[in-house]
Image: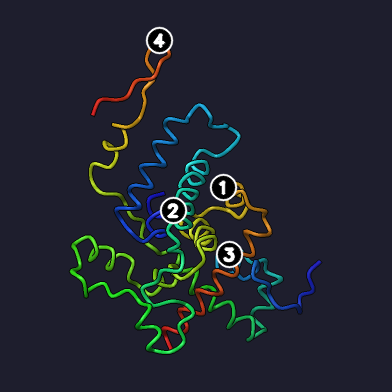
Protein backbone atom coordinates (compact mmCIF):
# COMPACT_ATOMS: atom_id res chain seq x y z
CA UNK A 1 0.00 0.00 0.00
CA UNK A 2 1.33 3.42 -0.97
CA UNK A 3 2.01 5.94 1.79
CA UNK A 4 -0.10 8.91 0.71
CA UNK A 5 2.52 11.36 1.99
CA UNK A 6 5.17 9.91 -0.37
CA UNK A 7 6.13 11.98 -3.38
CA UNK A 8 4.84 10.80 -6.76
CA UNK A 9 7.16 8.47 -8.68
CA UNK A 10 7.70 8.76 -12.43
CA UNK A 11 5.04 6.14 -13.22
CA UNK A 12 2.49 8.05 -11.18
CA UNK A 13 3.45 11.34 -12.83
CA UNK A 14 2.88 9.74 -16.23
CA UNK A 15 -0.51 8.48 -15.03
CA UNK A 16 -1.37 11.99 -13.87
CA UNK A 17 -0.35 13.45 -17.23
CA UNK A 18 -2.76 10.99 -18.86
CA UNK A 19 -5.54 11.82 -16.39
CA UNK A 20 -5.32 8.35 -14.82
CA UNK A 21 -3.84 9.07 -11.39
CA UNK A 22 -5.89 7.47 -8.58
CA UNK A 23 -7.77 10.01 -6.49
CA UNK A 24 -5.85 9.18 -3.32
CA UNK A 25 -2.56 10.14 -4.95
CA UNK A 26 -4.11 13.19 -6.58
CA UNK A 27 -4.75 14.47 -3.05
CA UNK A 28 -1.01 14.34 -2.37
CA UNK A 29 -0.32 16.15 -5.64
CA UNK A 30 -2.76 18.91 -4.69
CA UNK A 31 -0.95 19.42 -1.38
CA UNK A 32 2.67 19.05 -2.55
CA UNK A 33 4.21 21.94 -4.48
CA UNK A 34 7.35 19.88 -5.20
CA UNK A 35 5.34 17.16 -6.94
CA UNK A 36 3.21 19.71 -8.79
CA UNK A 37 6.27 21.42 -10.28
CA UNK A 38 7.80 18.07 -11.25
CA UNK A 39 4.52 16.77 -12.70
CA UNK A 40 3.93 19.94 -14.70
CA UNK A 41 7.42 19.77 -16.27
CA UNK A 42 6.85 16.12 -17.18
CA UNK A 43 3.40 16.86 -18.60
CA UNK A 44 4.84 19.51 -20.93
CA UNK A 45 7.34 17.06 -22.42
CA UNK A 46 4.75 14.32 -22.82
CA UNK A 47 2.36 16.78 -24.47
CA UNK A 48 5.05 17.88 -26.93
CA UNK A 49 5.79 14.23 -27.77
CA UNK A 50 2.19 13.14 -28.33
CA UNK A 51 1.58 16.17 -30.55
CA UNK A 52 4.46 15.34 -32.90
CA UNK A 53 3.28 14.98 -36.50
CA UNK A 54 3.26 11.67 -38.35
CA UNK A 55 5.34 11.63 -41.52
CA UNK A 56 4.60 9.72 -44.72
CA UNK A 57 7.03 8.48 -47.37
CA UNK A 58 7.00 10.08 -50.79
CA UNK A 59 4.46 9.24 -53.50
CA UNK A 60 5.12 5.95 -55.28
CA UNK A 61 6.69 4.34 -52.22
CA UNK A 62 4.18 1.45 -52.08
CA UNK A 63 4.66 0.70 -55.79
CA UNK A 64 8.44 0.66 -55.34
CA UNK A 65 8.09 -1.83 -52.51
CA UNK A 66 5.67 -4.09 -54.35
CA UNK A 67 7.98 -4.41 -57.35
CA UNK A 68 10.39 -6.23 -55.05
CA UNK A 69 7.92 -8.53 -53.32
CA UNK A 70 7.67 -12.16 -54.33
CA UNK A 71 4.09 -13.29 -54.98
CA UNK A 72 3.13 -16.95 -54.43
CA UNK A 73 1.91 -18.72 -57.59
CA UNK A 74 -0.86 -21.38 -57.67
CA UNK A 75 1.85 -24.05 -57.98
CA UNK A 76 3.30 -22.93 -54.64
CA UNK A 77 6.39 -21.32 -56.16
CA UNK A 78 7.25 -17.66 -55.74
CA UNK A 79 7.47 -15.15 -58.50
CA UNK A 80 8.74 -11.57 -58.56
CA UNK A 81 6.05 -9.02 -59.25
CA UNK A 82 6.85 -7.25 -62.55
CA UNK A 83 7.88 -3.63 -62.23
CA UNK B 1 6.59 3.11 -38.96
CA UNK B 2 8.07 5.60 -41.44
CA UNK B 3 7.89 8.34 -38.79
CA UNK B 4 9.90 6.21 -36.39
CA UNK B 5 12.58 5.49 -39.01
CA UNK B 6 12.73 9.12 -40.11
CA UNK B 7 13.20 10.33 -36.54
CA UNK B 8 15.78 7.65 -35.90
CA UNK B 9 18.02 8.45 -38.89
CA UNK B 10 16.91 12.04 -39.65
CA UNK B 11 17.28 11.55 -43.39
CA UNK B 12 14.16 11.18 -45.56
CA UNK B 13 15.76 9.23 -48.40
CA UNK B 14 17.53 6.88 -46.01
CA UNK B 15 14.34 6.40 -43.96
CA UNK B 16 12.51 5.43 -47.16
CA UNK B 17 15.25 2.93 -48.01
CA UNK B 18 14.99 1.41 -44.54
CA UNK B 19 11.17 1.38 -44.71
CA UNK B 20 11.36 -0.35 -48.08
CA UNK B 21 13.83 -2.87 -46.69
CA UNK B 22 11.46 -3.46 -43.76
CA UNK B 23 8.36 -4.03 -45.88
CA UNK B 24 10.18 -6.35 -48.26
CA UNK B 25 11.42 -8.39 -45.30
CA UNK B 26 7.91 -8.46 -43.83
CA UNK B 27 6.14 -9.39 -47.06
CA UNK B 28 8.72 -11.92 -48.20
CA UNK B 29 9.02 -13.43 -44.74
CA UNK B 30 5.32 -13.47 -43.88
CA UNK B 31 5.46 -17.25 -43.36
CA UNK B 32 7.81 -16.76 -40.42
CA UNK B 33 5.36 -14.43 -38.66
CA UNK B 34 4.13 -15.85 -35.34
CA UNK B 35 0.47 -14.92 -34.74
CA UNK B 36 0.93 -14.72 -30.97
CA UNK B 37 3.01 -11.62 -31.67
CA UNK B 38 1.16 -8.39 -32.56
CA UNK B 39 1.62 -7.83 -36.32
CA UNK B 40 2.43 -4.12 -36.01
CA UNK B 41 4.97 -4.92 -33.27
CA UNK B 42 6.66 -7.37 -35.62
CA UNK B 43 6.94 -4.66 -38.28
CA UNK B 44 8.28 -2.13 -35.75
CA UNK B 45 10.80 -4.68 -34.51
CA UNK B 46 12.18 -5.21 -38.04
CA UNK B 47 12.16 -1.46 -38.73
CA UNK B 48 13.86 -0.58 -35.47
CA UNK B 49 16.54 -3.24 -36.00
CA UNK B 50 17.19 -1.83 -39.47
CA UNK B 51 17.58 1.69 -38.04
CA UNK B 52 19.80 0.63 -35.13
CA UNK B 53 21.97 -1.49 -37.45
CA UNK B 54 22.36 1.47 -39.76
CA UNK B 55 23.26 3.86 -36.94
CA UNK B 56 25.82 1.42 -35.57
CA UNK B 57 27.35 0.90 -39.01
CA UNK B 58 27.57 4.58 -39.73
CA UNK B 59 28.26 5.67 -36.14
CA UNK B 60 26.02 8.66 -36.53
CA UNK B 61 24.09 8.08 -33.34
CA UNK B 62 25.43 11.26 -31.77
CA UNK B 63 24.95 13.35 -34.89
CA UNK B 64 23.19 16.51 -33.92
CA UNK B 65 22.23 19.78 -35.49
CA UNK B 66 23.23 21.44 -32.24
CA UNK B 67 26.78 20.16 -32.05
CA UNK B 68 28.25 17.25 -30.10
CA UNK B 69 26.76 16.67 -26.64
CA UNK B 70 30.27 16.91 -25.22
CA UNK B 71 30.77 20.43 -26.59
CA UNK B 72 31.06 22.86 -23.69
CA UNK B 73 32.04 26.19 -25.18
CA UNK B 74 30.33 28.14 -27.99
CA UNK B 75 33.38 27.50 -30.21
CA UNK B 76 33.13 23.75 -29.64
CA UNK B 77 29.41 23.80 -30.38
CA UNK B 78 30.03 25.72 -33.64
CA UNK B 79 32.84 23.37 -34.63
CA UNK B 80 30.75 20.22 -34.15
CA UNK B 81 27.34 21.40 -35.36
CA UNK B 82 25.86 20.69 -38.76
CA UNK B 83 25.64 23.75 -40.97
CA UNK B 84 22.73 22.98 -43.30
CA UNK B 85 22.90 26.12 -45.36
CA UNK B 86 26.59 26.38 -46.07
CA UNK B 87 27.13 23.67 -48.69
CA UNK B 88 24.35 23.97 -51.19
CA UNK B 89 21.26 22.88 -49.30
CA UNK B 90 19.03 20.75 -51.52
CA UNK B 91 15.20 20.99 -51.53
CA UNK B 92 15.12 17.69 -49.61
CA UNK B 93 17.50 19.13 -46.99
CA UNK B 94 15.18 22.09 -46.61
CA UNK B 95 12.19 19.78 -46.11
CA UNK B 96 14.10 17.81 -43.46
CA UNK B 97 15.25 20.99 -41.78
CA UNK B 98 11.66 22.23 -41.62
CA UNK B 99 10.17 18.89 -40.52
CA UNK B 100 12.78 18.00 -37.90
CA UNK B 101 13.97 21.48 -36.91
CA UNK B 102 11.71 22.14 -33.91
CA UNK B 103 13.17 22.17 -30.42
CA UNK B 104 11.55 18.86 -29.45
CA UNK B 105 12.74 17.12 -32.66
CA UNK B 106 16.28 18.39 -32.05
CA UNK B 107 16.12 17.19 -28.47
CA UNK B 108 14.96 13.72 -29.60
CA UNK B 109 17.90 13.60 -32.02
CA UNK B 110 20.30 14.03 -29.09
CA UNK B 111 19.03 10.94 -27.28
CA UNK B 112 20.81 7.60 -27.49
CA UNK B 113 19.16 5.46 -30.24
CA UNK B 114 17.83 2.97 -27.67
CA UNK B 115 16.18 5.79 -25.70
CA UNK B 116 14.87 7.30 -28.92
CA UNK B 117 13.15 4.05 -30.00
CA UNK B 118 11.51 3.61 -26.62
CA UNK B 119 10.28 7.18 -26.23
CA UNK B 120 8.91 7.29 -29.80
CA UNK B 121 7.10 3.97 -29.42
CA UNK B 122 5.65 5.09 -26.06
CA UNK B 123 4.50 8.62 -26.75
CA UNK B 124 4.27 8.92 -30.53
CA UNK B 125 3.00 5.45 -31.42
CA UNK B 126 1.12 4.97 -28.14
CA UNK B 127 2.59 1.57 -27.23
CA UNK B 128 2.36 0.27 -23.67
CA UNK B 129 5.54 -0.50 -21.75
CA UNK B 130 4.85 -4.24 -22.19
CA UNK B 131 4.39 -3.89 -25.96
CA UNK B 132 7.66 -1.96 -26.21
CA UNK B 133 9.46 -4.66 -24.23
CA UNK B 134 8.07 -7.32 -26.62
CA UNK B 135 8.84 -5.28 -29.71
CA UNK B 136 12.41 -4.40 -28.77
CA UNK B 137 13.23 -7.66 -26.95
CA UNK B 138 14.09 -5.75 -23.78
CA UNK B 139 13.21 -6.48 -20.15
CA UNK B 140 10.24 -4.43 -18.93
CA UNK B 141 12.38 -2.72 -16.27
CA UNK B 142 14.90 -1.64 -18.91
CA UNK B 143 12.14 -0.12 -21.04
CA UNK B 144 10.84 1.85 -18.06
CA UNK B 145 14.33 3.05 -17.21
CA UNK B 146 15.05 4.10 -20.80
CA UNK B 147 11.77 6.01 -21.08
CA UNK B 148 12.20 7.80 -17.77
CA UNK B 149 15.80 8.73 -18.60
CA UNK B 150 14.79 9.83 -22.08
CA UNK B 151 12.05 12.10 -20.74
CA UNK B 152 14.45 13.48 -18.16
CA UNK B 153 17.04 14.26 -20.84
CA UNK B 154 14.40 15.83 -23.08
CA UNK B 155 13.27 18.05 -20.23
CA UNK B 156 16.86 19.12 -19.68
CA UNK B 157 17.43 19.93 -23.36
CA UNK B 158 14.14 21.82 -23.61
CA UNK B 159 14.78 23.74 -20.37
CA UNK B 160 18.25 24.73 -21.64
CA UNK B 161 16.66 26.01 -24.83
CA UNK B 162 14.10 28.09 -22.93
CA UNK B 163 16.66 29.65 -20.56
Q: Secondary structure at mark 1?
A: helix
Question: Which comes sooner in the sequence, label 3 or label 1?
Answer: 1
What is the distance, in whole Å, between disc 1 and disc 4 at their CAs?
35 Å
Q: Mark 2 belongs to which subunit? A: B
Residue at which label 4 appears = A75
Residue at which label 1 appears = B135
Please provide percent x and percent y for residue B79.
Answer: 35, 81
Q: Can marks 1 and 2 be said to lie on one chain?
A: yes
Residue at which label 3 appears = B147
Q: Residue at x 68, y 59 (%)?
A: B141
Question: Which comes sooner in the sequence, label 2 or label 3?
Answer: 2
Q: Decide: few, some or many residues near mark 3? Use Cα within 10 Å; few <14, some 14-19, many ≥20.
A: many
Q: Residue at x 41, y 49 (%)?
A: B1
- The mark closer to the camera, 4 or 3, is 4
Residue at which label 2 appears = B54
Q: Nearer the viewer, residue A75 or B44?
A: A75
Question: Which corner quadrant of the image does residue B77 belong to?
Answer: bottom left
In the displayed structure, B86 sits above or below B44; it is: below
Q: Can marks 2 and 3 be said to lie on one chain?
A: yes
Q: Mark 4 belongs to which subunit? A: A
Q: Residue at x 65, y 78 (%)?
A: A29
Q: Secondary structure at mark 4?
A: loop
Amino acid sequence: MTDLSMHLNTDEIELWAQGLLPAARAIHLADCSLCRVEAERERKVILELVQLPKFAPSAGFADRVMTQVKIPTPSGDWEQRPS
Amino acid sequence: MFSLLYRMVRDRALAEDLAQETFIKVLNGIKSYRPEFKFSSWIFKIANNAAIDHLRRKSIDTLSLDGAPSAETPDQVRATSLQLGDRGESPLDEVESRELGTAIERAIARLRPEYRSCILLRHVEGYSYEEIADTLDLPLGTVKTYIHRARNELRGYLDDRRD
